[in-house]
Image: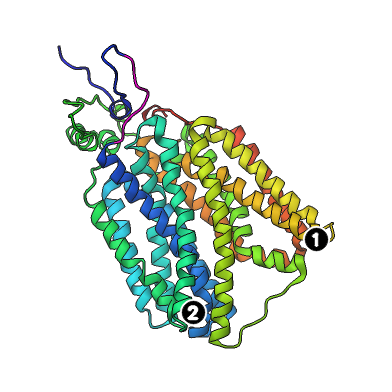
């Protein structure tokens, strides 16, 4: 009897059974699936590590190059701008050229720009290399999601994608901790170069590892390359004893539409338009609040509690103040990890949409507590303010910060998944860049209360739009989206 042809995902989702036909309910991960997951997680780790390390390195760059306020802003914005461009322009390359080639090239580019950054003799080259690092990290945003989600069983997809995403917070903690350790052992204005240099060898190791993975069977099938897709699935599901012994794929549904539009304009047509709005607009609104609070918490605390920072006059003072800032940032990062761990356990059980809505509302509640602190006296004033920021950081990671990333890689069809996820990530980074430039002006012009009220409004709008355009993807076969 000839075996029926099946889809790529049906092979990946297949569960082992007992002799009486009872399914075990679990899909055991193969060595190749674990390798793909670990290598994708490494990319998120580098993102958190490098972006947060820049915050520790910046005061030393200011001292070495004598940066003006404008130049300092350019250095701070360079990696964010690079991430925005990388997600938008390069993420779509994974739809055209394949997941694996882009997955390899982006980590090679990261290692190359890190070398340039560590050796940069002047400010222009520093900015160029930071921008290049951002492009490489931005490209990894959609690609890392795709290589995991298209190679993992549907029932485990949420927890494993978010498990990889959690390494962003782990990297942030590692970056600030590493920056602190280098400062503690190398009291030199050029210590920032060693911070970036520490990531070069690990990046090269990840590059070697990414060269050994297989291509996405779903992407190959969507391009009509059925024989290659069957070989890729065989490599992905290689196990002992061998199973399945024979893989026979049916024609991918996306190929049935001859002459379809795979360009950027297809994201605006029905039914993909709904997915684009759900993936991109809440992410934009989420990044307004997350980056606003994350980047400017010290400024808000200074204005609220009444303490201002003193300017350091020598390198020793710069390093001491930088070490204190690194300690504070590391404490905050621990709470972000708690939030993302909760998201890992809840995403497949509660669902993406419910968590995103609840998370947005929780963020608004945290910001409301911060506003309430303005009307109270000490010691409750500081306690309520910190409690509000702690609630905000936890809820943003259990909700919109995690779920927008997860949904963006799931709600689009295979042949548009790279473009869609890249566009959504770029929309979020537009919010981050706007926040970096406008937040200080709004804070100075309107004060803390007005600014917090605006962010409460964007959080509630994010919850409303998530529910209005909801597409629940928990446990659903990506080839059915």
Give the CA distance from mark 1 to mark 2: 37 Å
Q: Earlier in the sequence, mark 1 or mark 2?
A: 2
Render colour scheme: rainbow
Q: Is residue 31 above or below residue 168?
A: above
Residue 232: x and y in percent read 21, 37
Residue 323 visible from this viewpoint? yes
Identity of the residue drawn at 84% across and 60% down: 377
Which image quadrant: the C terminus? top left
Residue 283: x and y in percent read 55, 47
Residue 280: x and y in percent read 52, 45
Magenta segment, which residues? 22-29
Q: Residue furthest bottom?
A: 314
* Closer to the camera in the image, 49 or 89: 49
Identity of the residue drawn at 71% across and 51% down: 367
Identity of the residue drawn at 28% across and 54% down: 104
Q: Identify the mark at residue 61; answer none if there is no mark.
A: 2
Marks 1 and 2 in Cβ contact (< 8 Å): no
Residue 429: x and y in percent read 52, 55
* Closer to the camera in the image, 261 or 192: 192
Mark 1 crowd level (few <14, some 14–19, many ≥20, 10 Å Cα) = few
Residue at label 1? Answer: 379
Of labels 1 and 2, the one closer to you: 1
Left or right relative to 400: residue 47: left
Q: Is residue 54 above or below residue 11?
A: below
Q: Is residue 311 above or below residue 420?
A: below
Residue 447 sits in quarter:
bottom right
Q: Is residue 132 above or below residue 31?
A: below
Question: Is 157 covered by the magenta stretch?
Answer: no
Left or right relative to 82: residue 97: left
| Main secondary structure along the magenta-highlighted residues | loop
């Amino acid at each position: 009897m000839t075996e029926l042809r099946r889809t790529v995902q049906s092979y990946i989702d297949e569960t082992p059974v007992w002799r009486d036909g009872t399914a075990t309910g679990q899909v055991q991960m193969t060595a190749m699936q674990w390798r793909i997951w670990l290598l994708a997680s490494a990319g998120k780790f580098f993102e958190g590590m490098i972006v947060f390390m820049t915050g520790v390195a910046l005061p030393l760059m200011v001292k070495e190059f004598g940066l003006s306020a404008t130049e300092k802003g350019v250095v701070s914005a360079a990696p964010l701008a690079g991430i925005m461009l990388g997600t938008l322009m390069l993420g779509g390359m994974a739809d055209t050229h394949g997941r694996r080639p882009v997955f390899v090239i982006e980590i090679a580019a990261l290692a190359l720009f890190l070398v340039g950054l560590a050796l940069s003799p002047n400010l222009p080259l520093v900015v160029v290399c930071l921008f290049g690092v951002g492009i490489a990290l931005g490209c990894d945003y959609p690609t890392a999601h795709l290589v995991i989600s298209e190679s993992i069983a549907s029932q485990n997809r949420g927890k494993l994608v978010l498990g990889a995403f959690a390494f962003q917070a782990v990297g942030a903690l590692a970056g600030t901790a590493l920056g602190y350790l280098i400062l503690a052992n190398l009291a030199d204005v050029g210590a920032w170069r060693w911070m970036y240099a520490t990531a070069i060898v690990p990046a090269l190791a990840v590059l070697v590892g990414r060269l050994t993975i297989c291509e996405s069977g779903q992407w190959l099938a969507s391009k009509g390359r059925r024989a290659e897709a069957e070989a890729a699935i065989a490599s992905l599901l290689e196990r002992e004893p061998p199973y399945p012994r024979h893989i026979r794929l049916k024609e991918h549904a996306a190929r049935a539409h001859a002459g379809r539009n795979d360009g950027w304009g297809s994201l605006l047509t029905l039914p993909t338009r709904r997915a684009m709005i759900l993936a991109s607009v809440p992410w934009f609104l989420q990044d307004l609040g997350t980056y606003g609070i994350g980047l400017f918490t010290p400024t808000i605390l200074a204005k609220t509690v009444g303490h201002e920072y003193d300017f350091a006059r020598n390198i020793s003072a710069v390093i001491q103040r930088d070490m204190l800032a690194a300690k504070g940032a590391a404490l905050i990062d621990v709470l972000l990890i708690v939030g993302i761990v909760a998201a890992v356990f809840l995403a497949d059980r509660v669902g993406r949409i419910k968590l995103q809505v609840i998370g947005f509302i929780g963020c608004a509640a945290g910001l409301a507590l911060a506003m309430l602190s303005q009307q109270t006296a000490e010691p409750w004033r500081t306690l309520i303010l910190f409690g509000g920021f702690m609630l905000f950081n936890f809820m943003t990671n259990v909700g919109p910060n995690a779920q927008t990333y997860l949904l963006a890689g799931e709600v689009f069809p295979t042949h548009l998944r790279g473009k869609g996820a890249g566009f959504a990530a770029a929309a979020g980074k537009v919010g981050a860049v706007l926040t970096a430039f406008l937040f200080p002006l709004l804070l100075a012009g309107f004060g803390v209360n007005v600014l917090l009220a605006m962010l409460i409004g964007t959080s509630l709008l994010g919850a409303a739009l998530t529910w209005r355009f909801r597409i629940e993807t928990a446990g659903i076969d990506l080839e059915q989206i």
